Structure formats: C-alpha cells, structure tokens
Amino acid sequence: MKNLYELDHVVFNYDGNILLDDINIKIDKSSIVGIVGPNGSGKTTLLKLLSFLNFPHYGRFYYDGTELMKNNINQFRKSIGYVQQDPYLFRGTVYKNIEIGLKLNHINQKIREKKVSKILSLLNIEHLSTRLAHLLSGGETKKVAIGQAMILEPDVLIMDEPFSSLDKDSIYELEELITLLRAELNKTIIFTTHDQIQAQKLTDHIYTIVRGKLFPTHLINLFSGKFDKFNKVFDTGKQLIRIDNDLDNLELIAIDPRQIVLSLQELDSSMQNSFLGKITGIIEDSSNIKLNIDIGEKIQAIITRKAFSDLKLSLSMNVWVSFKSSSIMIF
Amino acid sequence: MKFYRSSKIIIILCFFSFQISAKDEVLRLAITKTVENSGSNRFFLDAIISSFNLILDIDAALFSIVITSLKVSFTAVFIASLIGIPLGIIVALNEFGGKKLLLISLNSLMSLPTVVIGLILYGILNRQGLLGDMALLYTPTAIITGLCILVIPIIWNLTISAVSSTDPRLANTCKSLGATQTQRVFIYISETRFALITAIVTGFGRAIGEVGIAMMLGGNIQGFTRTMTTAIALETSKGAFEFALALGIILLLVAFFINILLQYFQLKIR
C-alpha cells in the first residue's frame, strides 16, 4: 500500500518552544489512524500540520509522494477536510454553512445544490438544512462541520477530538460514518481522541503523542502525576508507583502491559511495584488476553492464553499486579 | 415598518407638545413663574420655541445646510469605509514588520485634532499650495477629503480590533476551506458585520459633529459648503440663536436617529 503521508524527522516550533519534536510517521492511503495523548501533548498541532494549516520548521514532509514546499502547501490543503475540536460555523443556515466551500471555489449553483443535498443525506441531517447554525447542539454542530469539510470531496478527513462532548447515540452515528467513509469512499481518516478503547475499536493504527513526541504504538497505561524524587515515588493522584530514577521534572509515565506479572498471591520478588487489584474487563485478542484491572488506577495487562487459563482468572476476581521499575517508560 | 412608525410618532409628539406650550399662554406663565422668571430663562425658552417653529416651517436655508452636512458626512464615511474596513481586516489577519508601530500610529490618529487636519489640507489646497491648481479649497470635496482623513483611522482601527477579537477558529476554517485573501476579507466582513456597523457609525458621528475641517476647508459658504456645525458657530456669533438652536436640535436628532438605526440593525442581524 502506498504511503499517503510520510514525515521524516519533522519539527514544529512556536514562540521558541518545540511543540512537535522529531516526528516520524507513515500513513497509508484509505487507513483510519487514531492519535491519542494527554492534553497539551501536541495532538492538535500535529493535526494542523497534517492538514497543511501549519508548515514544519525542520524535517521532510511528503504527501502522496511529493515533498511539501511553501509553494505547494495551498494545493495540498485542497485534498484535506479539517474538522476542529470545537467547530466554528458561519452565521446563517446549515445549508449555507455546508455550501460555502463550493461557493469559495466558484462552483455553479446547480452542482452546489446537488452536492449539498448529497452531503446532507450522507450525514442524515436533511432536517437541519434550514436551521440557524448557531442554534445547533454540540453533536449537530460537529456533523455540520464534517459536512462543511466533506463537501469539497477531500481525500483525507482530519478530525480533532470528534467524539468529545457527544452523547452515546451521536458517538455511535459518528463511528458508523467513519467506517462508511473509508469503506465506500476510500477516504483516509485521521482523528485524535482521549478514549483509548474507542481508538482501538475504530482504527488501523494508533499513535501516542506525549510532550510533542510521537510513538508509533499505542501507549497503554499512561499516567500523569508528580514525582517525589526523594522517596522515588510517582503519585498519579490515585496510586503510588515506585520508580528508580533521579529525574527532576517527571510528569508522565507509561507501564508496558506485557511486562506486568499477574499472580494469585503476593510475590516475594525483586519487583518494586506490587498491588492487589480487581479484574474489571477481559478482552480476547487473536493471540493474547487483555485484562483491565482496577488497582486504584485502571491498568491494562496483556498475558498469554496459557497464563490466563493456568491462573483460572475470571471477571471481578482479585489478583496481584506486579511490575519492575524498569518496565516503566518515563517522559 | 413598526420601528419607523414608532420613531415618527415620538418625533411628532415632541414637536406637538412644544407647539402647545408656545400657544398656551397660561401654561407659559406657569412655567415662567416656577423658574422664577429671569431674562435668561425666558430667552432660552423663546429660542427653543422659535427653533421648533423654524424646523416645522422647513426653512429653505436650514434645509440646504442639513443636506450639505449629510452629503459630505455620508460621502466621507462611505469612502473611509471602503478604505478603512479592508485595510483593517488585512492588517488584523497578517503579521508583518512595523505592525505595532502602525497600530500605535492609528491609535494616535484617532485623536487627531480636526483643526490640524484643516490646517495641513489648507496648506496643500490653497492657491499657493501643492494642489492649489485644482481649486478644491472651499468646496465640498475639500471637506470630504478632510473628513476622510479624520474618519479613516477611526474605521481602520475599530475594524482591526473587531477582527482581532473574532474567534480564532474562524481563521482555521477559512484556511481549510481554501479561501483566498479577498474571500477571507469578505468572510470577515460578514462575520464581524455588527462591529463594523458600530465602526461606521462612530466614524459618522465624528464626521457630522466636526467643525474645524468644515470651517477651514469649506469656508462656510451659504448654499454650498455651509454645514450644520459651521452654521451653528456663525449664527450664534451673529446673535441668531433660534436658528443655531434649530440646527443643534436637528444635529441631535440625526445622531439619535443613526443610533436607533444601529440598534435596529443589531436586532436584525443577530
């Protein structure tokens, strides 16, 4: 499959601060990509870069095989539909809001009418057509913004936190829409989310961004908190985790779910972290079992099927969770 | 329509009540007694009554003055808006060297003394001046030019602050929809239209109430460049207080009317 995006050591600064640091990413055509990460980690900045709203300061950026330059950024931008986290709609009706992209591109009225009604029915919002945009609910606003972005038939749809502040029904509809856009229209979809489970469910690839650094994997068990350097304890607010480190400004950690050891009794071992927890979820993978365990913080462990059956684990069962200090990634 | 009807009724009622007080001698006596009938009070009351009579009689000279005033002010504000609004949007949306200096200069120009504008343009437009051959001095064009110089910084500056305070998400939306620079200007005009109307009305208020430029560049020529403000100054010094007062009342009414119109638009465009 051909890469649509290829970012090679890309850096983006703002006011002297590095917001995106050494970004390396390859995104295939017609794939669904999720980007997860805590607030202020650079998710929106990365999306703006991928939407060609910002230009990188360093590194090489290829889109559909062509290198991004200042003189072709406007041309690239036309193939992207960008939906902001809290979309801005223009004064006027929903119809006018969706139509505006076509008007700006001097498309004649007959074609405009056809395209707008097609988008309205695709998004199932025909009934909102004559409603004033500023009177819409959060979910309706998001749908209209997606319509506004989709009207120009972009190859890529980029959405910043599309599921935030939506009710359950709207989330379900949007998930269906994302799947449909890829399946029927071959669109590439990139979105950010806080919800790791949702990201896992919908996407082909998940990237985690932490403090401007992108990890080509899904960082599970990501915790933010304060590090007490003297006692070598990281306080997540709900649980204390021992870390063998002398770093001063340690605010984020991630625990590798494959390095977590589960046992029915407390282990007498060199592992510095050991907690008694309760199993709250069991997810079967093709080769492994993912267990969601509540140890004060919600933590995920990945174990083999054999270990799962040997331990005879089941839902709501109490289990000891242990991991070494060295299995903790620090940021 | 309701709005026009109600404002018309208010104005007619005002005039009518004054007319009654002019004719009703008993009421007049009562007023004068309660305010301890002194010469100055009587003078002012008589002047108000005479001025309303003048307005109601639609004095030809008065009419010509009002029309000249409105003509020069509207033309100047129209030209200033055509220049100030696009410039304001462009300055607000773009970063360039010297932007801060420009903003400071525009802020200072907003409080530019009108006599100074009059003085500088007088120096340029008089017979020995740079543009003396164009014979523009003491013409409505000269007043319009002066008023434009006065009003452009106001509209320009207020447009900058209106656009700067718009939602930052609008800029991203415009960019992602592929709007060109010209299209962005029109989108911003549409999205900030209420603030822009306020900018225009502020400019109009400054233009119509201005006296220094109209006097120095217009020359206060009857039936040609005499505006409400220059006529008020002249008539007061001549002792025709009633006439000056009638003009003052019209000036006030125009200001009120423009403000009512603004509020009407505000309700309409929300």
Image (cartoon, rainbow, N blue to C red):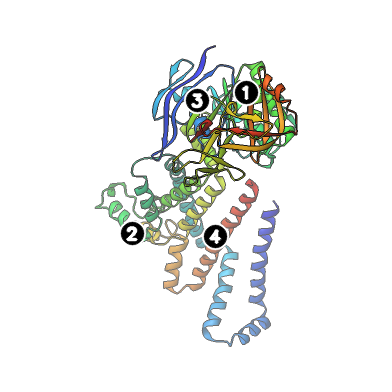
Label 4 residue SS? helix
Residue displayed at 38% across by 61% down: B212
- Crowdedness of circle 1 by 10 Å Cα count: few (<14), some, many (20+)? some
Q: Position of residue B27 (x, y in %)?
A: 67, 81
What residue sits right under mark 3 in the picture? A77
Between A23 and B97, the one lying in front of the other is A23
Label 2 marks a residue whose chain is B
Name the front one of labels 3 and 4.
3
Q: Which mark identifies residue B226?
A: none
Please state, as top left, top right, bottom left or bottom right, where the N terminus of chain A lies in the image: top right
What residue sits right under mark 4 in the picture? B255
Residue displayed at 29% across by 52% down: B124
Q: Earlier in the sequence, mark 4 or mark 2?
A: 2
Q: In 3D space, how far apart are the residues under numbered discs 1 and 3 (Cα atoms)?
A: 23 Å
Residue A182 figure quarter: top right
Residue A172 figure quarter: top right
Q: Earlier in the sequence, mark 1 or mark 3?
A: 3
What residue sits right under mark 2 in the picture? B116
Q: Position of residue A293 (x, y in %)?
A: 67, 34
Mark 3–mark 2 CB contact (< 8 Å) = no
Residue displayed at 51% across by 28% down: B178
Q: Which mark identifies residue A203?
A: 1
Q: In 3D space, how far apart are the residues under numbered discs 2 and 1 (Cα atoms)?
A: 68 Å
Query: Looking at numbered disc 4 in the image, what kind of residue is underneath it?
Result: Ala
Name the front one of labels 1 and 3.
1
Q: Is residue A24 visible?
A: yes
Query: Looking at numbered disc 1 in the image, what kind of residue is underneath it?
Result: Thr
Label 3 residue SS? helix
Query: Looking at numbered disc 3 in the image, what kind of residue is underneath it?
Result: Arg
